[in-house]
Image (cartoon, rainbow, N blue to C red):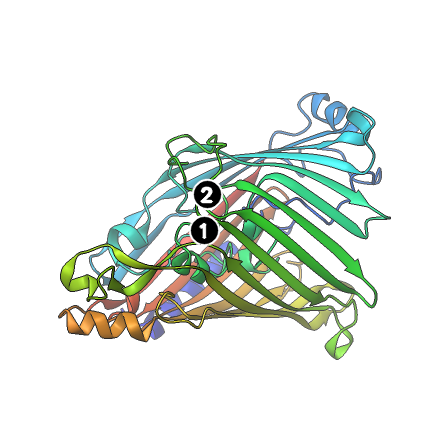
Amino acid sequence: MTRSAALPLFAAMVALAASSPAASAACLIHTGVPDESKSPTDESQPHFDLEDNLTGDWFGLRNWLYDHGADINGSYVAEPAFNPSGGVQRGATYLHNIGLSGLFHLDKLIGLPHSDFLVTFSQRSGRGLTQDKIGNAISVQQIYGGGETYRLVQMRMTHHLFDDRLTLSYGRVTATADFLTSPFYCAFVNNGICGQPPAPFFNMPNGITAYPQGTWGAVAALKLPQETYVKFGVYDGDPNVGDDVSQHGANFSFGRNGVLMLAELGWKPKEGFFGMPGRYSFGGYYHTDHEPDVARDVLNGNRFLTGLPALEHDSQEGYYLLFEQMLHRNAGRPETGLNAFTTFVASPNETKSVIPYFLNGGLVYQGLIPGRPNDKLALGGYYASYSSDLRNAQREAGLAPQHAETDLELNYQVQVTPFFYVRPNIQYVIQPNGQTNIENALVLGAEVGITF
């Protein structure tokens, strides 16, 4: 099936789903990031009920806990998908992620002002379509990865200081909960957008963490004048030490492969370009210890020919630009409308960077259809460019060289109720794994999310 032939099928799926009644809610966030849109001391927040949560208020217990400082939440996300054409073979897979979180406001619980403690858990099951059927590099289902098991994700202490101008967080944290992230990413299903740009995970295979994996770390975020901000973070540079998956996230030892440092400077105006909200940021990362060469072995030979361990380099570094911009406001609902985003990530040393250049971007329109103010239409994609050093070594060894992988996605999120959404999606993977010997893959799927 060609991409053009699949679009009418996707349009029919969207039309069928859009016939559901309107509701008001935001989509689930799967990264384990605290909800910064609500202040811990904001007593105007609605309490739990059956309209916004599947399990309601637990006969009043949940609201009592909330009033006394314990905010308990859960979610279920499923992503069935199949590839009717392309990839290594045809087939279908199913994945799910169950997320549980407790956000404890310590001013209410123990009298510690302006402080929160967040603990999150995840349980994942299923098989990935990318891994089982397509053979591409970046998963078409963002909830695959980190071990298909149950695990502790974060134990995060946060202090809001100086009228919330300075935020300090530390404990078992996730690097990409604070850096390389956007609220628009998880309007998509593929892992090249939702979650975080994946290039640093290819270039630092043991040095950076994403949901559902946590590691020891600390972050400081400072709000500066003129709607600018700066963030700094330092994390254990060896989060996989001791096989964190088999210990279900409870491996609390420190690694022996240096530290990972990240920084980001940004401008987040309420009235940026076009007089509408935006965010324009620049960041970078530096890993202090060993990273493998993409092509050479310890004797400086072709590692694909010799099979010897890779030559190691002393450090890894990279940079990123992340832009968000509202382009159009809906009349009567200024918080909704059309938003655009793009992210560019560069780790330009191609001797130690598998994907030295990565680009993603997209458009997200909330409230496009009259009477459906909380539905979202999203169109986006990513482009992952492989190292020329890697490609040349593969050619020398008689292997299929890796050039670039691209994924285009179109989806429509139907907010059926405030706690339940369905997101049918279509993806087209071009040059899976960056190789021309794997047929371009068409992916049809859906994401289903429920807030407990």
Circle 2 SS class: loop
x, y (%) of residue 38?
75, 45
Helix, strand or loop status at disc 1? loop
Q: Where does label 2 land, which residue?
A: 239
Pick the residue in front: 93 or 251.
251
Q: Amino acid at mark 2?
A: Pro
How many dots with numbers? 2
Residue 62 falls in image quadrant: top right
**Where, quadrant-wise, is the N terminus in this rendering?**
bottom left
Q: Quadrant of residue 243?
A: top left
At x 37% / y 32%, what residue is drawn?
A: 246
Of residue 285 and residue 61, the one placed in the foreground of this image is: 285
Amino acid type shown at disc 1: Gly
Q: Which mark is residue 158?
A: none
Of mark 1 and mark 2, the one earlier in the sequence is 1
Is residue 302 shown left or right of residue 434? left
Image quadrant in which you'd find residue 248: top left
Query: Left or right: 18 with respect to 298?
Result: right
Going by the picture, which residue comes out furthest to the bottom? Answer: 274
Give me the C-alpha separation between circle 1 and circle 2.
7 Å
Name the residue nearer the viewer: 19 or 101: 101
Nearer the observer, 211 or 201: 201
Q: Residues within 10 Å of mark 1 (few under 14, many from 20)?
A: many
Q: Are marks 1 and 2 in contact (CB under 8 Å)?
A: yes
Residue 153 seen anywhere in this rendered image of the structure: yes
Q: Is residue 223 above or below residue 340?
A: above
- Please name the residue shown 29% across and 51% down the image: 131
Q: Quadrant of the C terminus?
A: top right
- The residue identified by callout 1 is 207
Residue at x-position 68% and y-position 34%: 117
Could one spot residue 19 in this view of the protein? no
Q: Is residue 123 left or right of residue 170?
A: left
